[in-house]
Image (cartoon, rainbow, N blue to C red):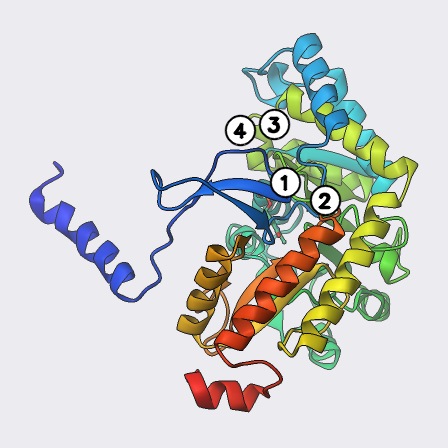
């Protein structure tokens, strides 16, 4: 079929619909390194503006850390730019193996396999280890990449209500006749910033002979006393059968992901996971940077401790100032507006005031749950946070939502 005017209008109309519904995603261009202070233009071509970044996954502030950049340069010089091959043909270097070993030690597992991204890790792992004799039982709020990975796998799919352990137990009882039961959860849920009840999940897994899968992308490097993740925080280090995580967030933020866990499972992925077999893995320059990242965060907990202090300051400041946040302990702090337009107008006001934060609404979050998701970083200094807090409270005052209840805000703006 040629690309006719009719075909063009099929897509044109759909895109126009997205704009009309106000859910067309516009991108802002950043002209600086990823950091707490960034230079942004929106729309492209507009005047550049220096703003404080409150919405990156740069939790440990390592995206532009001088030691990481230096290590990446050295890797580029010694191991070259690209592999031009998948791992099993001629795309494995010594440093890929070294990074897998370091991730294994850091995560407290038996073995690790790198993937081009965590999205790819999630796309490959279920199909590689489960068959139609098995069942996957997932929390209803797991990340989109897990949903996709489950779709690619022939095992039966089931879900349990978000963090509802009684419901999970029911499902485990229901599926006792299956060969393998795999419980699937995120560690830190990215939209609400709450943590999985991993200790309870492991308890249920032991009681009903199930395996546990944890995607710890929003936790690896900073959740838990030494930053190993949600399993450390919940006291179940060594008890998670499959962990997937990303190098694209706290761990330097470039790209790459992994499956880490029981050694037979990792080996099954090496033999069978399609994104591993048919796509290039992480480039040498990124591997070298990631090796330095793991060294930095294994040596000292300074950065995760600073992140914890920043988070406490931010949560306390917003709450005492009278804004409504989702309670929790992670550096993901959603400021609730409930109304989609209010979240957009609020973000615009912040931007005019030099603060970069993005409003989320349906379908990214449930209807009536619009919010600005703020994320803290160890790269934030007190002066960043004080300025950002001022701007949030000023905007709160302008829209008259300070010290109001949820019902009062909804009464004013609708849901
Ligand atoms: C970000 C994220 C991913 C995707 O990670 P990439 O490495 O960027 O593909 C997967 N799972 C969760 C829970 C995430 O938050």
Asked if residue 52 is positioned above or below residue 274 in the image, the reply reads below
Q: Quadrant of the C terminus?
A: bottom left
Residue pointed to by mark 3: 281
Q: Position of residue 12 (x, y in %)?
A: 18, 51
Tell me the SS state at disc 4.
loop
Q: Which label lies toward us, 3 or 1?
A: 1
Name the residue furthest left: 5
- Density class for disc 2 (Cα within 10 Å; few <14, some 14-19, many ≥20) is many
Asked if residue 102 is positioned above or below residue 397 in the image, the reply reads above
- Density class for disc 4 (Cα within 10 Å; few <14, some 14-19, many ≥20) is few
Image disc number at residue 6 = none
Tell me the distance, in whole angstroms, between the alpha carbons under discs 4 and 2: 36 Å
Q: Which label lies toward us, 3 or 2?
A: 2
Identify the residue at image location x=74%, y=65%: 195
Tell me the distance, in whole angstroms, between the alpha carbons under discs 3 and 2: 28 Å
Image disc number at residue 278 = 4
Q: Quadrant of the N terminus?
A: top left
Asked if residue 24 is positioned above or below residue 83 in the image, the reply reads below
Is tag 3's residue or tag 2's residue first in the polypeptide sequence? 3
Q: Position of residue 97 (x, y in %)?
A: 77, 24
Tell me the SS state at disc 1.
loop
Residue 72 location, quadrant: top right
Left or right relative to 342: residue 55: right
Residue pointed to by mark 1: 35
Q: Nearer the viewer, residue 212 or 385?
A: 385
Residue pointed to by mark 2: 379
Tell me the SS state at disc 2.
loop
């Amino acid at each position: 079929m040629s690309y006719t005017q009719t075909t063009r209008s099929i897509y044109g109309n759909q895109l126009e619909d997205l704009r009309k519904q106000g859910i067309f995603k516009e991108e802002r261009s950043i002209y600086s390194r990823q950091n707490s202070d960034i230079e942004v233009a929106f729309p492209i071509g507009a005047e550049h503006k220096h703003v404080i970044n409150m919405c990156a996954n740069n939790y440990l502030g390592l995206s532009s850390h001088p030691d990481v950049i230096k290590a990446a340069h050295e890797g580029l010089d010694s191991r070259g730019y690209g592999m031009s091959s998948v791992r099993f043909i001629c795309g494995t270097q010594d440093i890929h193996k070294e990074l897998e070993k370091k991730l294994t030690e850091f995560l407290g597992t038996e073995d690790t396999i790198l993937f081009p991204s965590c999205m790819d890790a999630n796309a490959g792992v279920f199909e590689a280890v489960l068959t139609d004799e098995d069942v996957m039982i997932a929390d209803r709020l797991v990340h989109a990449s897990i949903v996709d990975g489950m779709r690619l796998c022939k095992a039966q799919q089931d879900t349990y209500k978000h963090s509802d352990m009684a419901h999970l137990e029911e499902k485990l009882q229901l599926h006792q006749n299956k060969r393998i039961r795999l419980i699937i959860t995120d560690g830190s849920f990215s939209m609400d910033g709450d943590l999985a009840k991993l200790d309870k999940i492991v308890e249920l897994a032991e009681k009903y002979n199930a395996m546990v899968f944890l995607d710890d992308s929003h936790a690896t490097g900073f959740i838990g006393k030494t930053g190993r993740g949600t399993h450390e925080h919940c006291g179940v280090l060594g008890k998670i059968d499959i962990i997937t995580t990303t190098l694209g967030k706290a761990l330097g933020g470039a790209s790459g992901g992994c499956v880490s866990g029981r050694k037979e499972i990792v080996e099954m992925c090496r033999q069978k996971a399609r994104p591993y077999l048919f796509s290039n893995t992480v480039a040498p320059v990124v591997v070298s940077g990631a090796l330095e990242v793991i060294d930095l965060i294994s040596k000292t907990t300074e950065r995760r401790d600073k992140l914890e202090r920043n988070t406490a300051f931010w949560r306390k400041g917003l709450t005492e100032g009278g804004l409504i946040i989702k309670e929790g302990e992670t550096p993901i702090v959603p400021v609730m507006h409930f109304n989609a337009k209010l979240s957009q107008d609020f973000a615009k006001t912040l931007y005019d005031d030099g603060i970069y934060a993005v409003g989320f609404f349906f379908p990214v979050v449930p209807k009536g749950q619009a919010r600005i998701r703020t994320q803290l970083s160890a790269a934030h200094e007190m002066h960043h946070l004080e300025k950002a807090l001022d701007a949030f409270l000023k905007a709160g005052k302008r829209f008259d939502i300070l010290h109001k209840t949820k019902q009062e805000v909804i009464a004013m703006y609708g849901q």
